[in-house]
Amino acid sequence: MNMNERTTIAAISTAMSNSGIGIVRMSGDQAFQIADIVYRGRHGKKLMEQKSHTIHYGYIVDGEETIDEVLVMLMRGPHSYTGEDTVEINCHGGVFVVKRILELLIRSGARPAEPGEFTKKAFLNGRLDLSQAEAVGDLIASQNEYALQSSVNQLKGNIRDKISDLRNKIIYHTAFIESALDDPEHISVDGYGEELESSATEMMEEIKKLIDSADDGRILKEGINTVILGKPNVGKSSLLNVLLGEDRAIVTDIAGTTRDVLEEHITLQGISLNIMDTAGIRDTSDIVEKIGVDRARDFARDADLLIHVIDASSPLDDNDFEIFQMLHGKQSVILLNKTDLKMKVLKKDVEEAYFASNPAKCESDNTTEQNVSHKVNQDKIPEIIEISAKNRDGIDRLETVLKDMFFEGNLSFNNEIYITNVRQKTALKEAYDSLRKVVESIRNGMPEDFYSIDLMDAYEALGSITGETIGEDLVNEIFSKFCMGK
């Protein structure tokens, strides 16, 4: 038999590093038979004769040679992760040991699993829908508590249940229209347009809510892309070191020490920040430093969050003014650093400078003080926090503000669904557009068969989220991104 035709797959399911335990997983119709070739139990019993969901102590052997002392877990299909007979060999976690056991299984009749193939089998065998399968990958890659909980809820089927509800509504209307077109004498569509328009509009609102959740979903999954901005020597690198809890960035009294973008990943109060320490914003003749400053400006344009660090012990200048302009229209926080020194810049100074930098501010040079005050209220000023990176003063306040800024202070996972997948978001947009066409056709007095076409397009788009209407090539592409052994 050609190796690619073998239906039983095997892979190492734990990290390829020395550890206390290693797991080699096997799934397929020959899993128990292959395991019996390499396993020797203390009482000589065959694994094929054992009950499902039991664990057995023994040895993995290669002929007369004992490879390792193991525990073997048996799960008969369909009551397993893949829906097939599954064997998991728990051995000692040395890299050489687990590789030797895998090679032995392959010689005995299994074939190496492809990336994500165990989860792909679970999908193909109906154990998971596609949204749940993708949640498995997200669960493995989660880097904070919120991402973990979101993935767990998706794995439980919260997206599947929502999509199923929407598709049931769509197919109900489609079936009614088709029936009416086939039997107009007994089924009337008079006034049905109003009912369908109301239902389609309601579904559009539900889909729009899911689409809008994708921004929070991306942040949950990937983290908040954060850029620290400021003039040279204001304490940007010191702030990064404090947030990291280690001296990662070089800190000196020499202006322009940071010349390139230094990126780190940190977790604050359960949220992830992809945080970038940038070169100090200033005009410079140094070619290398100028490249670093230009990069800082580029990263700032694409960031989710800007943190403007100001040296409160030195007066504001034109460089601060330029940074204030970058903050407008962006999620941002202003930090008054070095409060352990004599402060020459107060919050009110920052507020006035921030408003003055607004490109959309009133152009009149004769604006009264009363009008200025009114404008300040209209142009919401970022949170201004007094800190001392040196003494860690104000850092707890910064962490709380960031959490409130992006998640309104509290993420509820009881009923909320967060779309964390670009593919799913794209499908939702396609479904939304198709339902919008239904509403437009109704308002334009188009024939009922037009409604049916667009309703089915929406039905198909939503089905692609759960994998009910998706091609084999896309399925293969999705699972190829999974780690080996899952």
Image: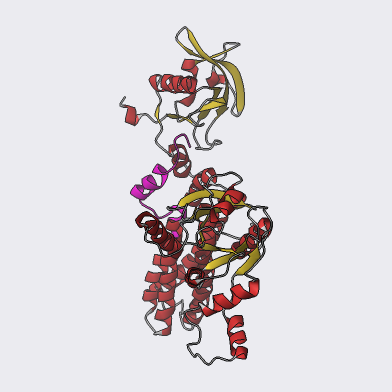
Q: Is residue 342 above or below residue 380?
A: above
* Residue for point 45% across, 79% down: 189
Residue 425 occupies quadrant: bottom left
Question: How does the figure colour the protein chain or chains?
Answer: secondary structure
Question: Is 368 positioned to the left or the right of 294 in the image?
Answer: right
* Residue for point 59% across, 73% down: 350
> Percent position (x, y) of residue 374?
61, 86
> Percent position (x, y) of residue 406?
59, 63
The quarter of the rendered structure image containing the N terminus is top left
Examine the rendering and report whether any part of residue 56 can be seen.
yes
The residue closer to the viewer here, 261 or 287, is 287
> Percent position (x, y) of residue 366?
53, 93
| Residue placed furthest toward the top | 64
Q: Which region of the structure is painted magenta?
A: 461-486
The residue closer to the viewer here, 290 or 397, is 290
Q: Is residue 8 above or below residue 241?
A: above
Residue 401 occupies quadrant: bottom right
Q: Is residue 170 magenta?
A: no
Q: Is residue 463 magenta?
A: yes
* Residue for point 33% across, 31% down: 4
The residue closer to the viewer here, 405 or 86, is 405
Question: Is 455 positioned to the left or the right of 56 in the image?
Answer: left
> Percent position (x, y) of residue 270?
63, 52
